[in-house]
Amino acid sequence: MDKNPGKAGTLAGWYMQGSSALGAVIALPIVIRVLGDDTAGLWFGLNGFLMVVALTDLGLGYVLARQIAYSLAAKGDDRPTRDFIPTEPGWLGVAQVYGAGRRLAGYASIAGALVVVVLCQWVIPSGKLGAHDRAETLWVGYMLGASAILVLLAKPHSSLIEGLGKVHWSRLLSGTHQLLAAFGSLGVLLLGGGVRGMAFSVVFFSLIYLVGVKRLGAALLRGKVIGEPAPGRGMIRQLIRVALPLGAVNAGAFLVSAIQIPLVGSILGPTAVTPLYLAQKVGQLANQAVMQFVFPQLPRFTGRVAAGDRTAASDLLAVSFRRTFVLSALVNVLFVFASPWFVGFVVGPGRYPEQRVLLAMALDAFIMTVSAVLAQFVLASGRNPFFFSTLLSGAVSLAFCWAFVDKLGLLGVPVCSLITGMAINYWFVPFHGLRLFRELKAHNSTPTKGGACQR
């Protein structure tokens, strides 16, 4: 697997998506049947609300993986761009970044714990999800929050693995974690543990995941660096400076997509959550499966940029974009016409959105996925021009949903997202992606002193 990291990363990414899909196919109908629409809607809604805890890492996971890939490939005499931090070249720089990341993850976990308290004590009880049994809601909320914090603490270790080009190992661990959490919580439910036992099971397997990813990260560093170099406050401040804008981008993206499930639960009630959750789950799994072609290429792309190999970097961008465009179009057509039959067969009739909602979701997901490919490569090049646009997009989408979902029902969710995207990020992101590609191609064809073109 290590001999072809790109292919291995894609295969491992499919394993991760397959684990999530298998868990959903088997677990979701049983969860809905055993818990009922109301309690199942509470479970899905709380899972959506507690996703906000992941935002407290401020984009740290991505920044660490990108910086580790850059430091490992750096020659020591290069001049990094604003979003890359000058470190010692090679393994010593990797160790410095890793140490700083672990310290920052500790700070983020404290912030995450505060967010969990605010959500569970004030935000969730203020909406229709709060109409459920309060003691049970609090227990499930705090357990799911603890699970999110454990995953947050695993971020620097998984970033180390991915930054070193071992994306396949990170995906394998993540997929196994999802598989165990899904079937573990399902087993607890079938044994009579209810929604409280399910939440405790999720925490347990998140702890197992943290231990596993931490041990693998330590094994990859063993023997590469003598001792553990201190990262220094300067590096920590620089990582925060670089991560903050990316964290804002993640927050904006959360407001565009992930917030939809808990928002629908708060506005329309927990029984309205299940149809949208099922449709989002199927669509996200399909489009994320396509994106698995892209993610393993990002550390390679950053390494090529750091090494000055712009030809290889531009080729990676072009191939990834073309492949994603075609495959995303295909999977979204299948989503519209095949997923209703599939969900009806697995879960039963009456628990899936109508056709026009699926059409709007598919169109929005296709444009979003194609734009996301370009955004990932722009970020991997060491720049982040999406700070204000994504925050603005998130705020506008949230405001539109809050205003129109009550009137339009589930159709209002993808329509608001699509209108907001077309007005802001669905043209702004491709503009910067095309500019990056042109810069790489222009550098490739710069004339040498002898008049030849450098290739």
Image (tube, rainbow, N blue to C red):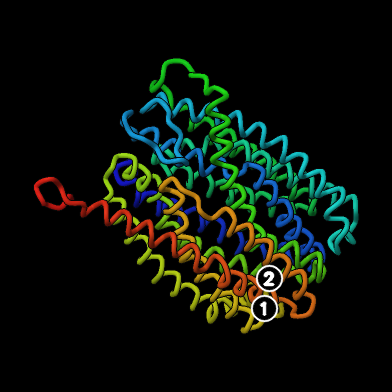
Of all residues shown, which one is farthest toward the top?
Answer: 227
Residue bearing mark 1: 353
In this picture, residue 379 sits left or right of residue 205: left
The quadrant holding residue 29 is bottom right
Q: Nearer the viewer, residue 176 or 289?
A: 289
How busy is the neighbourhood of tag 1: few (under 14 within 10 Å), some, or many (20 plus)? some
In this picture, residue 132 sits left or right of residue 452: right
Residue at the spot x=62%, y=63% of the render?
Answer: 393
Dot 1 amino acid type? Pro
How busy is the neighbourhood of tag 2: few (under 14 within 10 Å), some, or many (20 plus)? many
Vertical comparison of 253 with 355: above or below: above
Dot 2 amino acid type? Leu
Vertical comparison of 98 with 445: above or below: above
The answer to whether residue 27 shows anywhere in this view is: no
Q: Secondary structure at mark 2?
A: helix
Residues marked 2 and 1 touching at CB (< 8 Å): yes
Q: Nearer the viewer, residue 114 or 235?
A: 235
The quadrant holding residue 3 is top left
Residue at the spot x=50%, y=30% of the render?
Answer: 98
Residue at the spot x=67%, y=63% of the render?
Answer: 28
Q: Tell me the tag on residue 277.
A: none
Q: Tell me the tag on residue 276.
A: 2
Residue 52 at x, y percent in the picture:
69, 51
2 or 1: tag closer to the N-terminus: 2
Residue 233 at x, y percent in the picture:
57, 24
In this picture, residue 185 sits left or right of residue 345: right
The answer to whether residue 119 shows anywhere in this view is: yes
Q: Secondary structure at mark 1?
A: loop
